[in-house]
Protein backbone atom coordinates (compact mmCIF):
# COMPACT_ATOMS: atom_id res chain seq x y z
CA UNK A 1 0.00 0.00 0.00
CA UNK A 2 1.56 3.34 -1.01
CA UNK A 3 1.67 5.99 1.66
CA UNK A 4 -1.01 8.18 0.14
CA UNK A 5 -3.51 5.38 -0.16
CA UNK A 6 -3.48 5.01 3.62
CA UNK A 7 -6.72 6.68 4.74
CA UNK A 8 -6.62 9.58 7.18
CA UNK A 9 -9.53 10.98 9.17
CA UNK A 10 -8.68 14.53 10.24
CA UNK A 11 -10.46 15.95 13.27
CA UNK A 12 -9.73 19.62 13.93
CA UNK A 13 -11.30 21.99 16.38
CA UNK A 14 -10.84 24.39 19.27
CA UNK A 15 -9.47 23.72 22.72
CA UNK A 16 -11.37 21.23 24.90
CA UNK A 17 -13.94 20.49 22.21
CA UNK A 18 -13.57 16.77 22.89
CA UNK A 19 -11.75 16.04 19.65
CA UNK A 20 -9.08 13.97 21.42
CA UNK A 21 -11.65 11.71 23.08
CA UNK A 22 -13.66 11.26 19.88
CA UNK A 23 -10.56 10.78 17.70
CA UNK A 24 -9.20 8.09 20.03
CA UNK A 25 -12.51 6.23 20.13
CA UNK A 26 -12.91 6.34 16.35
CA UNK A 27 -9.33 5.10 15.93
CA UNK A 28 -9.98 2.22 18.33
CA UNK A 29 -13.21 1.21 16.62
CA UNK A 30 -11.60 1.18 13.17
CA UNK A 31 -8.29 -0.30 14.36
CA UNK A 32 -6.50 2.82 13.06
CA UNK A 33 -3.45 4.58 14.47
CA UNK A 34 -3.96 7.81 16.40
CA UNK A 35 -2.07 11.10 16.30
CA UNK A 36 -2.58 13.66 19.06
CA UNK A 37 -0.78 16.53 17.31
CA UNK A 38 -1.44 18.91 20.21
CA UNK A 39 0.67 16.64 22.41
CA UNK A 40 3.68 17.44 20.20
CA UNK A 41 3.19 21.18 20.72
CA UNK A 42 2.70 20.55 24.43
CA UNK A 43 5.92 18.46 24.54
CA UNK A 44 7.90 21.29 22.96
CA UNK A 45 6.34 23.59 25.57
CA UNK A 46 7.21 21.25 28.43
CA UNK A 47 10.82 20.95 27.33
CA UNK A 48 11.03 24.74 26.94
CA UNK A 49 9.58 25.25 30.43
CA UNK A 50 11.94 22.66 31.94
CA UNK A 51 14.97 24.35 30.40
CA UNK A 52 13.82 27.94 31.01
CA UNK A 53 13.65 28.85 27.35
CA UNK A 54 12.10 32.23 26.68
CA UNK A 55 8.77 31.75 24.84
CA UNK A 56 9.91 34.48 22.44
CA UNK A 57 13.15 32.69 21.49
CA UNK A 58 11.96 31.17 18.20
CA UNK A 59 15.35 29.68 17.27
CA UNK A 60 15.62 27.75 20.53
CA UNK A 61 12.04 26.53 20.20
CA UNK A 62 12.71 25.31 16.65
CA UNK A 63 15.77 23.48 17.92
CA UNK A 64 13.71 21.79 20.64
CA UNK A 65 11.00 20.83 18.12
CA UNK A 66 13.54 19.31 15.72
CA UNK A 67 15.36 17.33 18.39
CA UNK A 68 12.44 16.27 20.56
CA UNK A 69 13.19 12.80 21.93
CA UNK A 70 9.67 11.52 22.41
CA UNK A 71 7.84 8.22 22.25
CA UNK A 72 4.15 7.37 22.35
CA UNK A 73 3.45 3.98 23.89
CA UNK A 74 -0.22 2.99 24.10
CA UNK A 75 -1.76 5.79 26.21
CA UNK A 76 1.56 6.94 27.69
CA UNK A 77 3.91 9.68 26.48
CA UNK A 78 7.64 9.75 27.21
CA UNK A 79 10.04 12.66 26.86
CA UNK A 80 13.67 11.54 27.02
CA UNK A 81 12.48 8.29 28.64
CA UNK A 82 10.57 10.13 31.38
CA UNK A 83 6.83 9.58 31.57
CA UNK A 84 5.15 12.95 30.99
CA UNK A 85 1.59 11.87 30.13
CA UNK A 86 0.04 14.15 32.78
CA UNK A 87 2.80 16.79 32.91
CA UNK A 88 1.96 18.03 29.43
CA UNK A 89 -1.74 18.50 30.30
CA UNK A 90 -1.35 21.44 32.68
CA UNK A 91 -2.83 24.78 31.59
CA UNK A 92 0.67 26.28 31.85
CA UNK A 93 1.84 23.86 29.18
CA UNK A 94 -1.27 24.40 27.07
CA UNK A 95 -0.83 28.17 27.11
CA UNK A 96 2.87 27.92 26.24
CA UNK A 97 2.03 25.39 23.48
CA UNK A 98 -0.47 27.78 21.98
CA UNK A 99 2.12 30.59 22.05
CA UNK A 100 4.88 28.64 20.36
CA UNK A 101 2.43 27.14 17.85
CA UNK A 102 2.17 30.56 16.24
CA UNK A 103 5.79 30.37 14.99
CA UNK A 104 5.82 29.09 11.40
CA UNK A 105 9.26 27.49 11.81
CA UNK A 106 8.19 25.59 14.92
CA UNK A 107 5.19 24.24 13.00
CA UNK A 108 7.39 23.30 10.07
CA UNK A 109 9.80 21.48 12.37
CA UNK A 110 6.96 19.19 13.49
CA UNK A 111 5.55 18.31 10.06
CA UNK A 112 7.62 15.21 9.23
CA UNK A 113 7.07 13.80 12.70
CA UNK A 114 3.31 14.15 12.31
CA UNK A 115 3.19 12.62 8.81
CA UNK A 116 5.17 9.61 10.05
CA UNK A 117 2.06 8.55 12.00
CA UNK A 118 0.33 7.74 8.71
CA UNK A 119 0.62 4.00 8.77
CA UNK A 120 -1.48 1.11 7.58
CA UNK A 121 -4.37 0.42 7.98
CA UNK A 122 -5.21 4.10 8.64
CA UNK A 123 -4.88 7.11 10.89
CA UNK A 124 -7.15 9.34 12.92
CA UNK A 125 -5.38 12.65 13.59
CA UNK A 126 -6.60 15.46 15.80
CA UNK A 127 -5.45 19.06 16.06
CA UNK A 128 -5.95 22.41 14.40
CA UNK A 129 -4.45 21.94 10.92
CA UNK A 130 -4.74 18.20 10.27
CA UNK A 131 -7.09 18.62 7.31
CA UNK A 132 -5.64 21.87 6.00
CA UNK A 133 -1.85 21.47 6.24
CA UNK A 134 -0.63 18.10 7.49
CA UNK A 135 -3.01 15.73 5.68
CA UNK A 136 -4.75 17.79 2.98
CA UNK A 137 -5.71 14.54 1.21
CA UNK A 138 -7.57 13.17 4.26
CA UNK A 139 -10.62 11.19 3.16
CA UNK A 140 -12.76 12.73 5.89
CA UNK A 141 -12.26 16.13 7.53
CA UNK A 142 -14.27 17.04 10.61
CA UNK A 143 -14.40 20.37 12.41
CA UNK A 144 -15.45 19.44 15.92
CA UNK A 145 -16.60 22.19 18.23
CA UNK A 146 -18.83 23.05 21.22
CA UNK A 147 -19.81 26.21 23.09
CA UNK A 148 -17.05 27.73 25.23
CA UNK A 149 -19.11 27.09 28.44
CA UNK A 150 -19.43 23.39 27.67
CA UNK A 151 -15.75 23.19 26.71
CA UNK A 152 -14.71 24.82 30.02
CA UNK A 153 -16.84 22.29 31.92
CA UNK A 154 -15.32 19.39 29.99
CA UNK A 155 -11.77 20.65 30.55
CA UNK A 156 -12.55 21.14 34.27
CA UNK A 157 -13.75 17.56 34.65
CA UNK A 158 -10.76 16.24 32.69
CA UNK A 159 -8.25 18.09 34.89
CA UNK A 160 -9.94 17.16 38.18
CA UNK A 161 -10.05 13.50 37.13
CA UNK A 162 -6.30 13.70 36.49
CA UNK A 163 -5.78 15.19 39.97
CA UNK A 164 -4.83 18.61 38.55
CA UNK A 165 -6.28 21.64 40.38
CA UNK A 166 -8.60 23.84 38.32
CA UNK A 167 -11.01 26.76 38.50
CA UNK A 168 -13.86 26.75 36.00
CA UNK A 169 -13.99 30.54 35.51
CA UNK A 170 -10.25 30.79 34.86
CA UNK A 171 -10.53 27.86 32.48
CA UNK A 172 -13.24 29.58 30.46
CA UNK A 173 -11.13 32.72 30.22
CA UNK A 174 -8.10 30.66 29.14
CA UNK A 175 -10.15 28.82 26.53
CA UNK A 176 -11.45 32.07 25.06
CA UNK A 177 -7.95 33.56 24.98
CA UNK A 178 -6.57 30.42 23.36
CA UNK A 179 -9.39 30.39 20.77
CA UNK A 180 -8.56 33.95 19.90
CA UNK A 181 -4.83 33.28 19.56
CA UNK A 182 -5.34 30.04 17.60
CA UNK A 183 -7.89 31.65 15.26
CA UNK A 184 -6.01 34.86 14.58
CA UNK A 185 -2.48 33.61 13.95
CA UNK A 186 -1.24 33.96 10.38
CA UNK A 187 -0.03 30.35 9.96
CA UNK A 188 -2.49 27.47 10.06
CA UNK A 189 -5.18 29.41 11.93
CA UNK A 190 -7.97 27.49 13.59
CA UNK A 191 -11.04 27.61 11.36
CA UNK A 192 -13.50 25.35 9.65
CA UNK A 193 -12.28 24.77 6.12
CA UNK A 194 -14.81 24.50 3.32
CA UNK A 195 -14.09 20.79 2.84
CA UNK A 196 -14.58 19.94 6.54
CA UNK A 197 -17.86 18.71 8.00
CA UNK A 198 -19.07 20.54 11.08
CA UNK A 199 -19.78 18.53 14.22
CA UNK A 200 -21.12 20.68 17.06
CA UNK A 201 -21.02 18.52 20.18
CA UNK A 202 -22.52 21.07 22.62
CA UNK A 203 -25.52 18.83 23.24
CA UNK A 204 -24.16 15.52 21.99
CA UNK A 205 -22.93 12.63 24.11
CA UNK A 206 -19.51 11.14 23.40
CA UNK A 207 -21.21 8.13 21.82
CA UNK A 208 -23.37 10.29 19.54
CA UNK A 209 -20.35 12.34 18.41
CA UNK A 210 -18.32 9.21 17.78
CA UNK A 211 -21.17 7.66 15.79
CA UNK A 212 -21.49 10.74 13.57
CA UNK A 213 -17.82 10.48 12.56
CA UNK A 214 -18.11 6.71 11.99
CA UNK A 215 -21.24 7.20 9.89
CA UNK A 216 -19.47 9.76 7.70
CA UNK A 217 -16.54 7.40 7.30
CA UNK A 218 -18.85 4.54 6.30
CA UNK A 219 -20.62 6.84 3.85
CA UNK A 220 -17.24 7.60 2.28
CA UNK A 221 -16.37 3.89 2.05
CA UNK A 222 -19.73 3.07 0.47
CA UNK A 223 -19.28 5.81 -2.14
CA UNK A 224 -15.75 4.72 -3.00
CA UNK A 225 -16.92 1.20 -3.65
CA UNK A 226 -19.60 2.30 -6.14
O1 LIG B 1 -6.17 20.09 24.56
P1 LIG B 1 -6.36 21.35 23.79
O2 LIG B 1 -7.38 21.22 22.71
O3 LIG B 1 -6.51 22.55 24.64
O4 LIG B 1 -5.02 21.65 23.07
P2 LIG B 1 -4.09 20.66 22.30
O5 LIG B 1 -4.80 20.03 21.16
O6 LIG B 1 -3.40 19.76 23.26
O7 LIG B 1 -3.01 21.72 21.69
C1 LIG B 1 -2.32 22.63 22.49
C2 LIG B 1 -2.00 23.86 21.65
O8 LIG B 1 -1.18 23.46 20.54
C3 LIG B 1 -3.23 24.51 21.01
O9 LIG B 1 -3.72 25.59 21.75
C4 LIG B 1 -2.75 24.99 19.67
O10 LIG B 1 -2.31 26.32 19.72
C5 LIG B 1 -1.55 24.15 19.37
N1 LIG B 1 -1.80 23.21 18.27
C6 LIG B 1 -1.63 23.64 16.98
O11 LIG B 1 -1.32 24.80 16.77
N2 LIG B 1 -1.77 22.78 15.94
C7 LIG B 1 -2.12 21.51 16.15
N3 LIG B 1 -2.25 20.68 15.12
C8 LIG B 1 -2.36 21.04 17.47
C9 LIG B 1 -2.19 21.92 18.52
Image: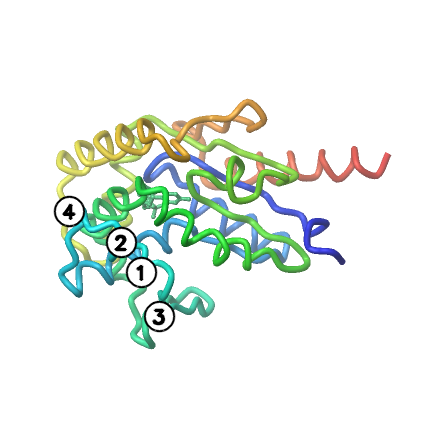
The x and y percentages for residue 76 are: 39, 67
- Disc 3 is placed on an element classified as strand
Identify which residue is drawn at 21% across, 59% down. Answer: 48
Q: Residues within 10 Å of mark 4 (few under 14, many from 20)?
A: some
- Disc 2 is placed on an element classified as helix
| Disc 4 C-beta below 8 A from ligand 1 | no
| Disc 1 C-beta below 8 A from ligand 1 | no
| Residue nearest the viewer, comparing 87 with 211 | 87
**Horizontal arrangement in the rendering, residue 184 relative to residue 127 (left or right):** left
| Residue nearest the viewer, comparing 18 with 51 | 51
The x and y percentages for residue 221 are: 75, 40
Q: CA distance from mark 2 to mark 4?
A: 32 Å
Q: Quadrant of residue 194?
A: top right
Residue 54 to residue 131: above or below = below
Q: CA distance from mark 1 to mark 3?
A: 18 Å
Point out the image quarter for the N terminus: bottom right
| Disc nearer the start of the sequence (1/3) | 1
Q: CA distance from mark 2 to mark 3?
A: 24 Å
The x and y percentages for residue 166 are: 15, 47
Circle 4 is placed at which residue position? 166
| Disc nearer the start of the sequence (4/3) | 3
Determine whether label 1 and label 2 are within 8 Å by CB: yes
Q: Residues within 10 Å of mark 3 (few under 14, many from 20)?
A: some
Numbered circle sitting on residue 63: 1
Identify which residue is drawn at 55% across, 58% down. Answer: 117
| Disc nearer the start of the sequence (2/4) | 2
Amino acid sequence: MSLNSIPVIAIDGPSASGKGTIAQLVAKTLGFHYLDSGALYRLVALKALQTNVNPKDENKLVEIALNLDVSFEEEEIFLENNRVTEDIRTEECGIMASQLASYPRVREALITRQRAFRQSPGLVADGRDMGSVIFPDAILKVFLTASSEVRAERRYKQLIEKGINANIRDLQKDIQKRDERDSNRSVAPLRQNTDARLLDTTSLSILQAQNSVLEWYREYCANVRV
